[in-house]
Amino acid sequence: MTTAVPRTGRRRGAARGRPSGRRRAAAAALLTSAALVVSCSGPPKNGAGADGVTLSKTTPAAKGDIDSFTWAVYAEPPTLDYTVAFDYPQNTILSNVCESLMRWTPGLTLEPGLARKAANPDPTTWVYDLRGGVRFHDGRTMTADDVVFSLGRQRDPDNAAAWAQNFENVASVRKTGPLQVTVKLKKPDSQFPQYMATAAGVVASRAGVQAAGKDYGTSGGLACTGPFSLGTWNKGQSVELDRFDGYWGKKARSGKVVFRFMTDPSARTNAMLSGEADGGYLIPTESYGRLKGSGVGTLHFGEGLSTVNVNITNMKGPLGDVRVRRALSLALDRSGFVKAGLGGAGTVTNSLTTRAAWAAGSEQTRKNALDALPGITPDIGKAKALVKEAGATGKTLTVATSSIGQDVSLLATAVQAAGARIGLDIRLKTIAPNAFTALFTDPEAREGIDMFPLTYYDSITDPLDLLQNFKTGAYMNFAGYSDKAYDAGVARATAEYDPDKRLTIETELQKHAAENLLWIPVAEWPTAVFLNKRITGAPTTIAYMYYPWAADVGAAR
């Protein structure tokens, strides 16, 4: 629930547009939200990352309030309707306006959100007790009816919600008290409660959404509960958020936030260097050096739960033979890509999932999941032989590319170069930054494309968020891969509430995906955020996608 990534879950190149899977049950023990924090935590601890990059959870706390600050984003959201909030631009803005039943913290743990408590009295029931006195931006007070309505929009087939897959296992959502909602599942589902901290769990005013009608998300207000309300939207230029003085929680440090849409990476960097923008996430990797040495501010890094991959979108041609996919993987210069495409901040990997995603498992479980995957040491001779065995020498393939950032364009170029070294004719198809998201939503946009760079970020701290993408019919299973045994494994993992038991099942899923190269893993990539000397307080981790990060930003001194 995640572009080029498009940059989505869900992703940039990513879909981090996404959606997810479900699962079976453990004992009928009562699980409160506190228990969720333990089972769903993925603790990014401060420390050294790749090439000496230091990872943190957040930037220093603000020392005072400010009137406003300006933020650079790489594309304008087509809508801010929470049901289709699957990409970076939408969620970066929406996370400060709309809130969910649960909340993802900067430390990538779960805590109560609009629900003050979540309980699991039996394996197929989740009960959410709501906070009282929470006001929507339209002046109304939140009730259980609003929650039932909001989750119902995600389940409505007429809405084409990006998060619909996360609700496939939901049998009913009912009001069971003025401030209580009960979700009945068709079968136990370990993932559903975790997704209630994402845009899938957003609560908006029923009356406000209905009054907006078809214009909801594109004009007027969003009728949500967050620390900011939607202000002026200057199409093609910017979105403004205004501090909501009726907020139930700690009020925002800034009176206003202005998000400027800047599709050109150089323009975004120059805006941050000149002070036109006070900061931004998704920093162009080619600008890491300039920003670090500018003296204007500080470039910070945090856990991104993100892996850079080559998304295989067509298995009807040469890539339908796993030997061709393995050959490309063996010929790919991952180290060169990390250095040039990720500014040296990433880490070469043979895993589709990040190490942090496995944090809830035991040491042995984590070791089993990550240490037994196929090697990725370049071997051009072996790669050529595989292509020849598959009868693919000289065959033509197309990889999508975009000027959205060097991470995208240079990975596409690296794939093309790998193909040339082993006898494949790989051609580039350039797609405009604003159109890249269509690769995740429109099958026609993927016509004629065999693969594209994909940075996938997890929307929850669980490897199944990514691994469920390869089950039959999954939202991001663009190549149409299908394996009954794999589907059964996803079902078993979804049903298992015990973290270590679930991760053990997911270890086998990861091994299967890696051996079959359903996507080609390339690198882990931390989140980057730049703040000039005027402001501080923004979290550094991927939590900013669903956590009201802008409310923490204030005066640096």
Image: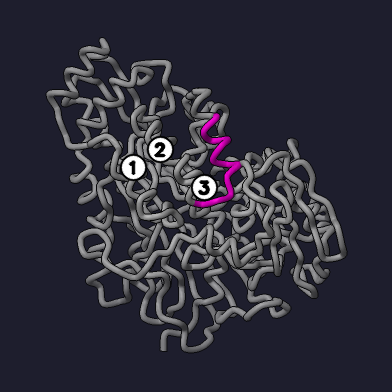
Say which residue label 2 marks. 510
The alpha-carbon separation of the residues under discs 2 and 3 comes to 20 Å
Mark before the other along the chain sequence, 1 or 2: 1
Which numbered dot is residue 270? none
> Is 495 situated left or right of 306 in this image?
right
Q: Which is nearer the N-term, disc 3 or disc 1? A: 3
Q: Nearer the viewer, mark 1 or mark 2?
A: 2
- Label 3 crowd bin: few (<14), some (14–19), many (20+), radius 10 Å: many
Tell me the distance, in whole angstroms, between the alpha carbons under discs 3 and 1.
19 Å
Region of the chain picked out in magenta, as a range: 488-499
Residue bearing the label numbered 3: 10
Q: Is residue 263 above or below residue 418?
A: below
In which quadrant of the rendered view does residue 35 lie? bottom right
Q: Amino acid at mark 1?
A: Ser
Residue 161 left/right relative to 44: right
Q: Vertically, is 223 above or below 170?
A: below
Instruction: Specify which label sits upstream in the sequence, 2 or 3.
Output: 3
What secondary structure prevails in the magenta region? helix
- Let me know if residue 492 is in the magenta part: yes
Residue 328 included in the magenta stretch of the image: no
Residue type, mark 3 in image: Arg
Residue sitting at 34 percent across and 29 percent down? Answer: 515
**Which residue is the site of mark 1?**
351
Residues 82 and 509: in front is 509
